[in-house]
Image (spheres, rainbow, N blue to C red):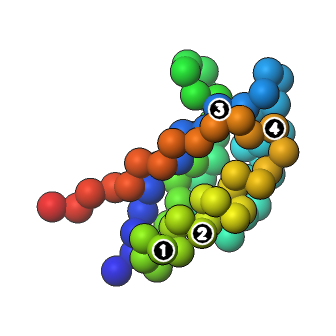
Amino acid sequence: MVVQAYILIQTEVGKAAQVAKEVRDIGGVAEAEDVTGPYDVIVRAEAKNVDELGKLVVAKIQSVEGITRTLTCPVVHL
């Protein structure tokens, strides 16, 4: 089973487009779009399990320069 999540990202001022571009190239990221509102970038990500999702967010996405905060929202399938 694949775990999916939306990751909401806040960036430094003026960095949203660059962050979205860099995040788009990370394995496990299906989509990354810069948006307006309280968050600057929204990412849809997929991983094999919750542990892999956590590693993707902490080790890869949060290491992108310009990101100040992330919020991970796992997709719930009922």
Q: CA distance from mark 2 to mark 3?
A: 19 Å
Q: CA distance from mark 3 to mark 1?
A: 23 Å
Compute the Cα span from label 2 to label 4.
19 Å
- Badge 4: residue crowd in 10 Å (few <14, some 14–19, many ≥20): some
**Among numbered discs 4 and 3, the one appearing first in the sequence:** 3
- Between disc 2 and disc 3, whose residue precedes? 3
Read off the residue under disc 3. Answer: 10
| Residue 46 x, y percent position in the rendering | 50, 67
What amino acid is labelled 3 in the image? Gln
Q: What residue sits 34% from the left and 80% below the top?
A: 1
Q: Secondary structure at mark 4?
A: loop
Local packing at callout 2 (Cα closer than 10 Å; few below 14, some 14-19, many 20+) is: few
Q: Which residue is mark 1?
A: 51
Q: Which residue is mark 4?
A: 66
Q: CA distance from mark 4 to mark 3?
A: 9 Å
- 22 in relation to 26, above or below: above
- Which residue is identified by label 2? 55
| Residue positioned most to the left | 78
Left-right relation of 38 to 64 = left
Q: Quadrant of residue 69?
A: top right
Q: Of helix, strand and loop, which one carries label 1?
A: helix
Which amino acid, mark 1? Asp
Structural distance between the alpha carbons of marks 1 and 2: 6 Å
Of the 4 image quadrants, the one containing the C terminus is bottom left
Q: Tell me which residue sits at (71%, 35%) in the image.
A: 68
* Apparent side of residue 44 relative to residue 73 in the rendered image (left or right): right
51 versus 67 height, above or below: below
